[in-house]
Image (cartoon, rainbow, N blue to C red):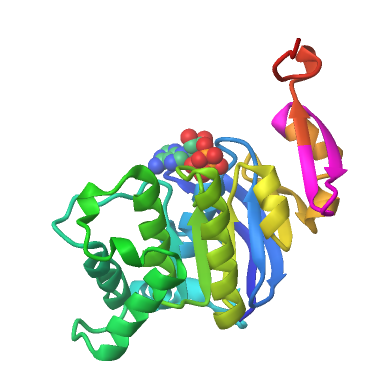
Amino acid sequence: MTLTIANLSAGYGRTNVLQDVTVSNIPPGAFVGLIGPNAAGKSTLFKTIAGLITPTKGTLTIAGEDVTQLGRKDRAKRVAYMPQAYGCNALLSVFESVLLALKQTTGWRVNNDNLDRVSDTLHALGLSHLANRGVADLSGGQAQMVAVAQTIVRAPDVILLDEPTSALDLHHQLSILTSVRNEMDRKKPVVMAALHDLNLAAKFCDRLVLLRDGAILADGKPEHILALPQIEETYRVLTDLERTQRNVLYVDARLAHQGTAGPTHH
Ligand SMILES: Nc1ncnc2c1ncn2[C@@H]1O[C@H](COP(=O)(O)OP(=O)(O)OP(=O)(O)O)[C@@H](O)[C@H]1O
């Protein structure tokens, strides 16, 4: 279902962070990368969409319905949010923790369909082998992948992933985002992911939204956004945008005063 964020302003107490944020017509099945420097307001935008922060202005509509008016539980059925800081010390197995995430928005009675859904989600993300492990005993990367499983298991309309690959090795960065894309092809949610790695963003996203100082600077296809001068200004780097032999976009970035970065080979 289509998500539209219109003229959204929000913050913490008297501090305003988001200023009139509009991202229109994100269609079902679209993968939107939210990019921007540290403290730009990416997490604040996600928390506001998820209903953890009440906006001072603006609307959020899913399929034309203003979800800011929904109660907490109904909102959580429509929007699932994976925060940047996750982690769980409970005495739960991975399977139980994903089941618990699923049941948060339904009743507590567990049926076979629920169990199948948890199994399918773990399988889709390549996590079946961790099903019986305690969540407190996972590595940082494993915990991050389980947090993604907890977010997508509910099959919501909108999935918000705050830096879902920050703790993952190269293989798992690709595998988790590929799995998310495969799930999207099946269930057609809107997915928004905050990503610091512009090359991952270029590879997986249909659309990039550049946020800086709480405002949207640019919104469009990756090849357009990554070529904008605002990228260099915002990140305070110089960039070259290339296409690899496999026709994949590649951003090479360097600091302005350092010439070419990288090791010197003799
Ligand atoms: N709980 C809070 N109370 C007050 N200010 C906050 C709070 N959380 C974040 N901020 C401020 O809001 C601004 C935006 O922070 P936010 O976490 O949304 O940025 P971000 O783009 O997600 O950053 P990063 O890439 O570093 O995770 C920052 O100036 C931050 O200090």
Q: Residue furthest front?
A: 266
Residue drawn 57% across the image and 81% down it: 186
Instruction: Answer left or right for 135 relative to 139.
Output: left
Nearer to us in this view, 125 or 227:
125
Q: Residue furthest left?
A: 91
Q: Quadrant of residue 73?
A: bottom left
Residue drawn 43% across the image and 64% down it: 126
Chain part drawn in magenta: 235-251
Instruction: Answer left or right for 198 relative to 102.
Output: right
Work out whether residue 15 can be spotted: no
Tell me the quadrant of the picture where the C terminus can be found. Answer: top right
Residue drawn 34% across the image and 67% down it: 128
Q: Relative to 156, is 15 above or below? A: above
Q: Quadrant of residue 37?
A: top right
Residue 247 colored in magenta in the image: yes
Nearer to us in this view, 161 or 202:
202
From the top left corner, tell me how far across and down residue 87 is, in percent. Answer: 30, 49
Work out whether residue 86 can be spotted: yes
Q: Relative to 201, is 258 above or below? A: above
Residue drawn 28% across the image and 82% down it: 115
From the top left corner, tell me how far across and down residue 221 is, in percent. Answer: 80, 59
